[in-house]
Each structure stands twice: as C-alpha cells, then as structure tokens.
Image: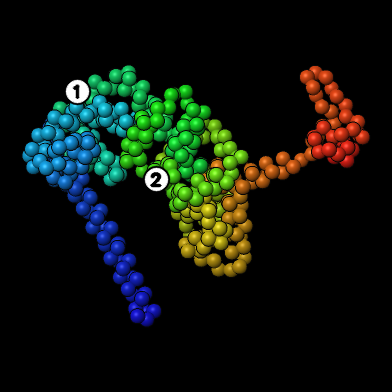
Amino acid sequence: MNEKELKEAFKNLQVGLEKMKVDQLKNQERRYWGKTITIPFTLHEGLAGYTKYELDDIRRYLDLKGVSSLKKAELIAVLEEEIPESLGKFCLQLDEERFNLLINLAKNGGYMHVADYEFHKINYFRASGLVYSGTYNGEKALVIPNELMEPILSLANHLNIRSVIKRNTEWIKLTTGFLYYYGTLGLIQIEELLKTYTKEPFVLHEYIMVMHEAISYHKDVYVDAHGYSHRDVDDSETVKKEHRMRKSLSFYPFKKIQILKASEANFVDRNESYIELVNFIRKNYELSREEADILVEDCVTSIRNGDSLNEVLELLGSELEFDSMETVQAFADLVVSLVNNTREWFLKGYTPTELSDRKKSALQPLPETKLREGKKVVKVGRNEPCPCGSGKKYKKCCGR
C-alpha cells in the first residue's frame, strides 16, 4: 500500500469512526428520550418499559440474590417490592446534588424537564430503578414513580439523612479538590488530609461506598490499585512513585476554600503564565478565547502528566502553525513560564518555582548575629564556635 492509499484508508477510517459516534448518539437519544411518558407515572410502567438487560442492571445494583434466572415479568414483580425498600439506603450514599434532584422531582409532581443532561448521570439513576427518562409534553424529562414521591419528600426533613448527605458532599468535594492538585492519593493519605480539613469522623467503609457512588455519577475521579486519581491522570503508578521519591516534602498546604473551589465542575487554575499564553494565541491566531483556553488547558494537563517541554510544544504545533523560528522561540518562552508556574502532581501540588525558592531559602546563612535563649540575649564572639553547628569559627561561617 503506497502513501496515497494509506492516506485514503486513514480518511475512510476517520469517516467511519465519526459515523459510529453519530449512530451511538442517536441510539442513546432514542434509549433515554424515545418513550412518551404520562403523569402520574407508576413504578410498574417504568420497569415494564425496560428490556430484560436493563432490569438486570437494576437487580445487580440492588445486589439481589437468587433472582437472575427469573423471567421479565417475574423480575419486575420482585423489583416493584425491592426498589421502594432501597430508597433510604440509596440516599445515605448521595451528595446534595443527587439528593436535591430527587427532592425537586417529588416537589414538582414527579417530573422535571431537562434540556441537556449528561448520559452517564442518567445511567446512574436509571440503574437504581428510582428515576426514569422519556418525553413528557414533547420535551425531555426525568420522572420518578408516583409510589416514591411521598417517601422521598419524607426524607427531605430527616435530620440524620440530611447530616449524612452534608458529610458525603464535603468528602466528595474535598477528595475531588485534593486530586485536582495532587493527582493520585491512597486511602491513608486521603484520610489524613480529610482530618485536616473537616471535623467529621472518618469511617473507612462508608467513605469507600460514598466515593464509589460519586465516581459512577460525577466521573471526575477514578480508582485503581494505586488509589484515587483525578480523571486526567494518565499514569497513577508514576504519580505515586514521584510522591514516594519526595517523602520529606509535605503536600502543599492549600486553604480549604481553594480545595473546594478546585472541586467545581470544569475548574481550571488559571495563573498569570496560563493567561499570557492564552492571550498570545488569541493575538496571533484566529481562535476564540474558549478555543485558546481549551488548548492551554491541554498543555497544563500534559505538563502535569510529566511531558517534556518539547512534547508540550509538539502539542501546540499539532493545533497551530509555527511560521518562523521567532514564533517557536516565543512559544518556548511562554511554555517554560507555564511549566515553572503550574502546580504539578509529581511535586505534591507545588510549582517548580515554589520548590526552587524553598531550596534557595534553605541555603541562606543565618541572618542574625545574636541568639535568644528565652529573654536573655547571647552575643557570639567572632572567634567562638559558630552556633549553627558547623564546627567553624563564627567569623569564618555565619558571621561573614
């Protein structure tokens, strides 16, 4: 196959992949919004509208034993009993966003129109058997069965439920914020950090369950053998290895408000170097602010994953045309500044500049020529041993 044929084959492959994406999106649209819903909506109607495969998803989520061989009608009968019973336990794993969605649905007569709702969030609720999707009055809508409305509303004023949900929300937000800045953390590290930022007692098995549910819904974090990681971490093992290499370096001490801010959807830490690169791209290329911002955000992700300066420049070069060596040099200078001022996962949330400043500070000689012992001032003679412990005379060491 010659070069021309290779290019044609690659082009056809791209067209095929794009068609697959379009077809997949259409199938999802039909699956989630294809059914017309009537209000009031019953649990039986919701379950009857599902395939056996979808009902099995609910069965597995509820961890029901001994029912896998049941036929569809028999399984529906079991689920009609089990789903209302699961409501209280389900809510104990929620954060405020998910719990408030249930409350708002119940308060609104069992439905809520949604213009755009992420598919993975719909999947999460559909798998619980508590929330269903379809078209109501010609618009996309999420609905809950009529039988669940009163039980959900009764939980809204349950003090214990509210307290647990508040705790869950803080756990999830703080963990997401930690991982934004630190990349990957093990459970022991997360426990230590949570104890620093919250007064709530840490219960390991409850935390694991809460995070398992949060990951399924939010998709901001993933978990593997190396711990919990930010969604953009390419190699959690390498992040952990880099952390271990810096045992003496504590994690950067962010304020709680900074950690919570970093947990917000689509948060980006835009420092001065970041903004300078965005502005340079906008000035020299016909890109919108949003397009330039996305490109620089990709550069930051590349840096945090340990890519070199050349690799970051290659990333920019794949999207922008460098028309001269002067342009290349200008980008190199801006990227170096971005690298030096990016809070890196490998560096436990520090920027390279901050660590460099710390090293310089540690190498500075003692500035004072007097030592204080309580309230007593002790003068050090120039020929006396230096108080820093070097073994040299003061005039030859810190007294110079």
| Residue 335 appears in the picture as rendered | yes
Q: Residue beneath label 1, please?
A: 150
Q: Earlier in the sequence, mark 1 or mark 2?
A: 1
Vertical order, 175 against 286 (above or below): above
Quadrant, the N terminus: bottom left
Gap in angstroms between the C-alphas marked 1 and 2: 39 Å
- Residue 8 quadrant: bottom left
Tell me the SS state at disc 2.
strand
Identify the residue at image location x=85%, y=31%. Answer: 369
Vertical order, 358 against 192 (above or below): below
Residue 37: percent from left, percent from top: 14, 39
Residue 338: percent from left, percent from top: 58, 51
Identify the residue at image location x=19%, y=35%. Answer: 64
- Left or right placement of residue 60 versus residue 9 in this view: left
Q: Nearer the viewer, residue 130 or 64?
A: 64
- Residue 251 quadrant: top right
Residue 231: percent from left, percent from top: 41, 46
> Which disc number belongs to residue 228?
none
Residue 236: percent from left, percent from top: 46, 48
> Which disc number belongs to residue 224?
2
Vertical order, 180 against 304 (above or below): above
Quadrant, the C terminus: top right
